[in-house]
Image (cartoon, grey):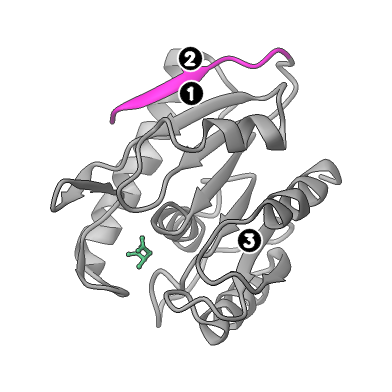
Amino acid sequence: MKHIFKPGTDPEKPTLLLLHGTGGTEQDLLGLGQEIDSEASVLSIRGNVTENGMPRFFKRLSEGVFDIEDLKFRTKELYEFIEDAAKEYKFDRSNVIAIGYSNGANIAGSLLFHYGDALRGAILHHPMVPVRDMELPDLTGTPVFIGAGTNDPLCTAEESEDLNRLLKDAGASVELHWENQGHQLTMSEVQAAKQWYSKL
Ligand code: MLT
């Protein structure tokens, strides 16, 4: 997968796995990662599918309707890519924290839904429920920050509540943070995520 790896200055820090939104690239969230933890290593990835030239992490049938077969395939592909990257760049595979926005938050959510050991934690900015009607792995103790919008037209408040409940039922410790700026990622949401991260 096309990506950027930047080693951090403190090897004890997590590796931040950066996952962009639809139409983004591996460059997009570098500033966000820097804001959350400037000493951490960063693995920033470009989604492997394109929709009308826009990179994404998995296919969709229409807006908000996911191609579940492709989502599962791409989730496994990403999981295996992280394993390979950990060996190549020599970072601690068990200390990876995802930071995803929109489509990137959805594939990060899918990693959590499919694998108990994919992520040490996750910051999900405006995620949806990646897959319904599946049994989640044991996520006991996995910290998850959800940045949601009361008026987000893509990821509705109800959907954010559903995701919160599903992750909590699997044992994750979830903080659900609300904004009211639609689907936008605002500075106040980033600051809330940073505050959450600083307490890990
Ligand atoms: C998705 O397709 O993952 C969501 O609708 C969010 C987005 O538009 O990227």
Q: 31 or 93: which is nearer to us?
A: 31
Q: Residue at x 22, y 48 (%)?
A: 54
Residue wearing tag 3: 139
Mark 3 or mark 2, whichever is nearer to me: 2
Whether pointer 2 and pointer 1 mark residues with C-beta atoms closer than 8 Å, the reply is yes
Observer able to see residue 80 = yes
Of the numbered discs in the image, which one, if any, rests on residue 86?
1
Q: CA distance from mark 3 to mark 2?
A: 26 Å
Identify whether 31 is placed above or below 56: above
- Membership of 36 in magenta stretch: no
Q: Residues within 10 Å of mark 1 (few under 14, many from 20)?
A: some
Amino acid type indicated by mark 2: Tyr
> Which quarter of the picture shows residue 70?
bottom left
Amino acid type indicated by mark 1: Ala
Magenta range is: 1-9
3 horizontally vs 185: left or right: left
Q: CA distance from mark 2 to mark 1?
A: 5 Å
Of labels 3 and 2, earlier in sequence is 2
Q: Residues within 10 Å of mark 3 (few under 14, many from 20)?
A: many
Q: CA distance from mark 1 to mark 3?
A: 21 Å
Of the numbered discs in the image, which one, if any, rests on residue 89?
2
Q: Residue at x 30, y 42 (%)?
A: 47
Q: Residue at x 51, y 46 (%)?
A: 118
Query: Quarter holding the N terminus?
Result: top left
User: Helix, strand, or loop for circle 3?
Assistant: loop
Amino acid type indicated by mark 3: Leu
- Mark 1, ligand 1, within 8 Å: the answer is no
- Mark 3, ligand 1, within 8 Å: the answer is no
Identify whether 3 is placed above or below 28: above
User: Helix, strand, or loop for circle 1?
Assistant: helix
Rendered location of residue 185, percent (x, y): 57, 56
* Ligand 1 occupies quarter: bottom left
